[in-house]
Amino acid sequence: MKRFVPTAPVHDEPWLALMKGIYEVAEMFPDDTVFIGGIAVYLHSVASGLAPNLIEKSHDADLYISLPAYDDLRSIESVTSNPRLRKKQFIKYGMDYDVYLEHNNSLLVSFADILAGSIVIDHVRVASLEHLLLLKLMALESRSGTPKGPKDERDVIRIVLLLKQHGVTKSRLERYFTTDMARTLEQLSHSREFVTLSRGNLHEARTLRDTYSTMAASFQKRILMARSTRRRP
């Protein structure tokens, strides 16, 4: 399904350079590349009409790519390897791109599942909200306490708020969602990033926190308990 939305006008040269590169990559590989990470959360947020203060631009791009498309990408871009993190990287218009290769990556969710659940927003194929939640929770576990941790927290909060708006496709979560993820979602109910998102408005922060907490609690009930019930003999 395609949903086209206008990209918010900005006067930010790095952001314009990043979006220019993303559009070019998306046009070259429309069916073999899925954008994940912060840029996917941004596009979902804009498409869903989140309040401007809840929308946050990204400083780089993350993409999941099929093996055939990766071979073509290497003929176009100067791709390097990062064996420690099991990913590839390249720079386009001065902006960083992290590339996760089908069948050879550290991501929790398979490329086939990500591709099957993906949608196109503003001409860019992005992962579903459910798959983004799984990937962001995985990133948060590994980057908690680092400079990227607060941004990961804000992205998880945004995704949960968006899932509250759109509803949850449980089948995308059931295979991968864990009790540790449920615990992380619950712990984030106490995050200071609600105040950051509300720009210091404590009343709005409390409203966001309450909405998030209700939704986060439902994951354990609707996903983990449902899966446990099906596994009973």
Image (cartoon, helix red, strand yellow):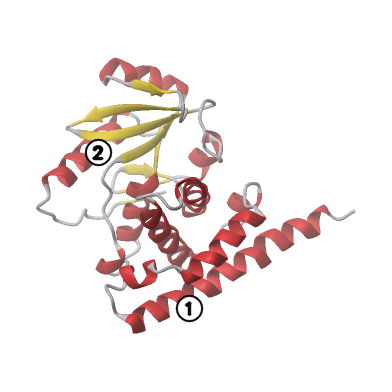
Q: Position of residue 190 (x, y in %)?
A: 48, 71
Q: Position of residue 218 (x, y in %)?
A: 61, 69
Q: Nearer the viewer, residue 66 or 77?
A: 77
Up the image or down, 141 lies above or below 30; here it is below
Up the image or down, 120 lies above or below 31; here it is below
Q: Secondary structure at mark 2?
A: helix
The residue at the far front in this view is: 145
Amino acid type indicated by mark 1 = Asp
Q: Position of residue 24 (x, y in %)?
A: 24, 33
Q: Which mark is residue 210?
A: 1
Q: Secondary structure at mark 1?
A: helix
Discs 1/2, front: 1
**Residue drawn at 49 percent across, 53 percent down:** 133
Q: Which mark is residue 23?
A: 2
Q: Pointer 2: residues within 10 angstroms few (<14), some, or many (20+)?
A: some
Asked whether residue 120 is in view, the answer is no
Left or right, residue 209 beside residue 19 = right
Asked whether residue 146 is in view, the answer is yes
The residue at the far bottom in this view is: 203
Q: Nearer the viewer, residue 173 or 89?
A: 89
**Residue drawn at 43 percent across, 53 percent down:** 145
**Residue drawn at 30 percent across, 15 percent down:** 75
Q: Pointer 1: residues within 10 angstroms few (<14), some, or many (20+)?
A: few
